[in-house]
Image (cartoon, rainbow, N blue to C red):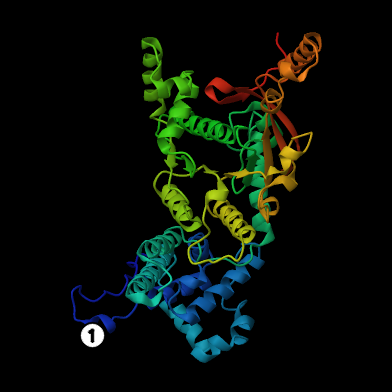
Amino acid sequence: MSDQSPAPQPSPAAEPGGSLHEMLQRVPPANLPAEQALLGAILTNNKAYESVSDFLHPSHFADAVNAHIYEMITQRIERNGGKGGVDIITMRGDFEASPILAAAGGADYVAKLLNAMVGIVNARDYGKVIHDCWVRRQLIGIGTDIVNNAHGARPDLDGQEQISASEEALFNLATDKGQEGGFLVFSQALKKALDIADQAYQHTGDIVGLTSGLRDFDKKTGGLHPSDLLILAGRPAMGKTALATKIAFSAAQSLLREAEEKGEPPRGSVAIFSLEMSSEQLAARILSEQAEVSGERIRRGDVGPKEFDRFVRVATELQRLPLHIDDTPAISLSAMRTRCRRLARTHGLNLVVVDYLQLMRPAIGTRPDSRVLEISMITQGLKAIAKELEVPVIALSQLSRQVESRDDKRPMLSDLRESGSIEQDADAVMFVYRDEYYLQQRKPKEASFPSPDKYQIALEEWQRKMSLVHNKAELILEKQRHGPTGTVHLYFEGEFTRFGDLDTFHE
């Protein structure tokens, strides 16, 4: 037979608009001749397997016997190190030992596969036809679930939650995730690890992951890595939101700069879920930082003509940033996952920032017994998002009040509020701390001293200590699963709520 035979096409579906009886009689999309022709081609020449192995899996076959045979062939080829050597002779023992194949006719069915083979040139086309039929069957299943749920099959879900569940199912299908799973052969995992190591080796700088815009932090961590959940915690007024915004802005800047160097639009983006501040407030904060105009003065309208011109110019530049802000209050984990998936599909996604996790709600349909369990479910869900979308997720967290009762108010892991599994699920836990904030509250009061001289001595000592910590902040890396811990010293400019690198040496 000719190797140029046309690829089999899916069986035609029933005409749209038919009666209900006709719709119920429809046969799910399948193309059994294509499945048999592909299996026959692989058994004749293993190069046919190489043309489909990157996208075709046993679950994609409509016929259970064909799926079982493809799985046996796949396992044998993988055991041979992908070098082939699989044919009707080498597979004879496996075929004879299979009760599934025996029920379908045994050797007679295998002979039928070989007779169905029309060459290997069109093997990839056969595989695409098989996969397309599988996609159509999944769509029918999702559509059926949508109809049944809308009719009340899931009374626990309201209309909006059903939309989220449907979007999630469609996203899983679009990315071919959620239909797979199981174990990964160690050699494949090892190859991925070697690829990451090679990228790090080829990289000229200290940053392997996405930049945070903070030099010393990137040196200690290598940047922000895919699939990592990072917890950024601190007491109120320490600057958690400002620091997270700085990191998100720097990452978006890096994506834009990289795209401009290639002369193309950005292929990724940064998502900020701001549950506490509105998108306008967050944008104003970034604008204040970049234009170097005090946010307080912006709110009062106390801006001169030159500053306003700079304000407008910076705003024009910032419009091009691949930065997306969602300020939905008390957003659920399910809604956040759906929106991240949608953004990943439409614009690409490189970083997710959540401000802050105590304001989130757990996944739709869950009823945790306690607040600690609820927070644990949220952190586990955020880690799952990071792994599924292969992006770093930075989640801000509050700290308990017990920090205030200590002389040294630097936070510790035990200070994490409603900690539960926060520490356990996170790949990194870091605290932002500013000694200047606490020292400022301890300014001596003249009425507390018996004489002006003693007050002056205390005031001078306080001023000396203030000069040592003025405009300084600490980012305490208390846990890092893949690297060292320690403290990163940062510069903090309160007027613009801006963090930056702290230069301790000058030429």
Q: Is residue 268 left or right of residue 373?
A: left
Q: Is residue 132 left or right of residue 276?
A: left
- In the displayed structure, 381 sits above or below 92; it is above
Q: Answer with the quarter of the image where residue 433 lies.
A: top right
Q: Is residue 281 left or right of residue 396?
A: left
Which residue occupies 60% across, 87% down? Answer: 96
Q: Quadrant of the C terminus?
A: top right
- In the displayed structure, 270 sits above or below 385; it is above
- In the displayed structure, 395 sits above or below 42; it is above
> Toward the viewer: 162 or 6?
162
Residue 357 visible in the picture: yes
Q: Answer with the quarter of the image where residue 435 lies.
A: top right
> Toward the viewer: 95 or 87?
95
Q: Answer with the quarter of the image where residue 127 lies.
A: bottom left
Q: Is residue 341 left or right of residue 186?
A: left
Helix, strand or loop at disc 1?
Answer: helix
State the residue position of label 1.
Answer: 21
| Three-letter amino acid code of the residue under disc 1 | His
* Residue 386 image position (x, y, % from top left): 57, 50
Q: Quadrant of the N terminus?
A: bottom left
> Toward the viewer: 474 or 187?
474
* Residue 166 image position (x, y, % from top left): 39, 64
